Image (tube, rainbow, N blue to C red):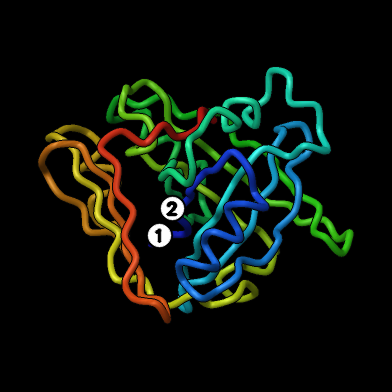
Amino acid sequence: MNQLDHIIIAAPNLVQAVESFADTTGCKPMQGGAHAGLGTKNALLSFGGTSYLEIIAPDPAQSLDGTFGAALADFNGLQLLHWAIRSNDLGTVAARATQIGFNAGPIRDTSRIQPDGTRLAWRLMGLRGHELGGLVPFYIDWLDCPHPADTAPVVGPLIQCSVSVLEGPLHELIGTTSGVDFKTGPPNLTFSFESTKGDIEYASNSPGGFLL
């Protein structure tokens, strides 16, 4: 069964984002590592179950020319960006998505180097052929990697992850995803979680997402 894997918020500066998030929530994100060639690095927090939060930002140690990190450098503070579904059968997801009108992107072998030097590797697949940006999830297969929900600091339980789009093929593809409240209505992505400093919510009518 497909299930919510993680939610991504983006910032122009990871150090500042981590400090701001810690001040707001009482929990300091764990450094995740750099995405070589993408111009980005991340920090991670767990919701204490099977899903987690990723903060992604430019990596100043890499050349940012033409990378996704260069685009994030223009962001204004922390912004809701995208969300991901966990699946161990990306090929079947791709075939189903194609049947109902999406263009499945290539299945990408992806990795990052953790601060201790170890390398994590997994697979990603995006969906194209739409104009919904980060409202449409991408898919991730963690292969044999330890999952960040099990290794990152726990900020607090996820209260909700809600996705709303107008009627269309996305409902057929992801309408039964575990951990996601999927609705028919004006475009919106909202998630909220508990923290030691109170409930926190992020929302966007047009999250940009990344093209995979």
Residue 156 percent across, percent down from the top left: 43, 77
Residue visible at 64% across and 49% down in the picture: 14
Number of other residues with Cα within 10 Å of mark 2, as a class: few under 14, some 14 to 19, many 20 or more:
many
Residue 167 percent across, percent down from the top left: 12, 35
Does the image show residue 59?
yes
Does the image show residue 178?
no
Mark on residue 4? Answer: 1
**Given contact means CB atoms under 8 Å apart, are the residues at marks 2 and 1 in contact?**
yes
* Location of mark 2 (residue): 85
**What's under tag 1, amino acid-wise?**
Leu
State the separation of the CA atoms marked 2 and 1.
5 Å
Q: For numbered disc 2, what is the local secondary structure?
A: strand
Q: Is residue 89 above or below residue 12?
A: below
Mark on residue 13? Answer: none
Residue visible at 70% across and 58% down in the picture: 32
**What's under tag 2, amino acid-wise?**
Ile
Residue 201 percent across, percent down from the top left: 31, 60
Toward the viewer: 182 or 172? 182
In which image quadrant can residue 196 be found?
Answer: bottom left
